[in-house]
Amino acid sequence: MRCVLFYHAFTSCWNNGNAHFLRGYARELHALGHKVIVYEPFDGWSRLNAIREGGANAMADIPRLFAGVDIRQYDTCLDLDRALDGADLVIVHEWNSPDLIAQIGGKRAQGAAFTLLFHDTHHRAVSAPEELAQFDLDGFDGVLAFGEVLRQIYLKLGWADRAFTWHEAADVALYHPLPQVEASDDLVWIGNWGDGERSAELNEFLVEPVAELKLCASVYGVRYSDAALHTIETARIRHGGWLPAHWAPVAFAGARATVHVPRGPYVRSLPGIPTIRVFEALACGIPLVSAPWSDTEGLFPDGAYLSVTNGSQMKHALRAVLDDREMSSAMVQKGLRTIREQHTCRHRAEQLVGIVADIRDSRGSAQPQRCVGAVA
């Protein structure tokens, strides 16, 4: 297939966790023998912020790391007819502009032969539904939703007639154990502080346990306010700033444990959807302790990570992981096996090919389809 993918950003992952999976499945589509072309706006906010933070070198690594993926940047003069010429599959990620989404949908509605999918990897369906409601998806053949609960929302609200559950996964070409790296930290957390929507959770499940246990810890990410920086510095936690996604495996390898602290909308309204960091941490072979979230779709077996419900339990769990090497080793092995057997970008690329085949076989049917991540 000739696959044409429209992303807000491929070369930059600044405050753009979507890029991790989008890059990974694009690479795997290419590895499966498909032609993959990615379009990104030259002046996207993620790219511009990465450049401002001195990330030009990190972005320069991307063409080499994703060799075979044809990355094309455009300005306001994108020639859609040329971009879509000969396409068999077109995927439009939800961080694109409403105008671009409508224009591409219009091409399909006017009879273009490609299969057209809308890809949603965010919580806006529950946190800002008015933003998604403005998208014109009438011309799309279906929606790829990164969780079953999100798929159901699209169908219930009438935003799509056909939707598929298509979870994110680990790009194991990048995310894998690095035993040659010596662990110098007790704990590492990689994530953006954001607008304060999970400040309380980060304090309870990250900052306070580190301070009380007197752990050697590092955090990486952007959008840390002065107050947030003061909080982590008071806890003697090192802030390493922006960490490009392809450098994260070294950070994971340099620590003995990590934590998962999901944002509130995922916990309250989108159960069953972990952050991409769960897949990536387990793929890197680091023991993980998670703040509350509901694995309603059974993505991970018991023992792949530890789950806690409050800060006190987090302290006990971290102490156990750091002190009990037999237990942490068992967690690592189960987590690695789960990722390698079920949750890699290769699994998702193969699944995507199957979804496209199903759509083509049933083109014209209005019946919604379900395809759960990692189910063959």
Image (cartoon, rainbow, N blue to C red):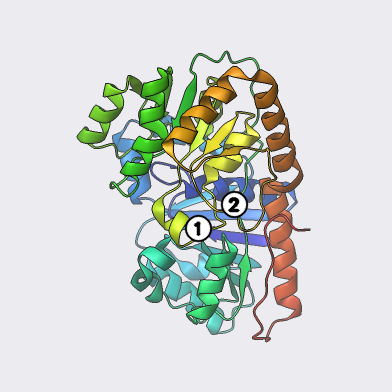
Residue 253 can be seen, yes or no: no
Task: Name above or below for residue 4 compared with residue 55.
Answer: below
Percent position of residue 311, x then y: 42, 36
- Which residue is at 61% across, 56% downward? 167
Find residue 121 and name its label: 1
- Which residue is at 32% across, 19% downward? 236
The answer to whether 216 appears left or right of 193 in the picture is right
Percent position of residue 54, x then y: 33, 30
Q: Extreme left residue here?
A: 226
Give the amino acid at mark 2. Answer: Glu
| Circle 1 SS class | loop
- Which residue is at 40% across, 24% downward? 210
| Circle 2 SS class | loop
For label 2, the residue is: 168
Classify 10 Å Cα crowding around label 2: few (below 14), some (14-19), many (20 and above): many
Percent position of residue 337, x then y: 75, 37
- Which residue is at 43% across, 75% downward? 102
Label 1 – label 2 distance at C-alpha: 8 Å
Find residue 287 and name its label: none
Q: Are marks 1 and 2 in contact (CB under 8 Å)?
A: yes
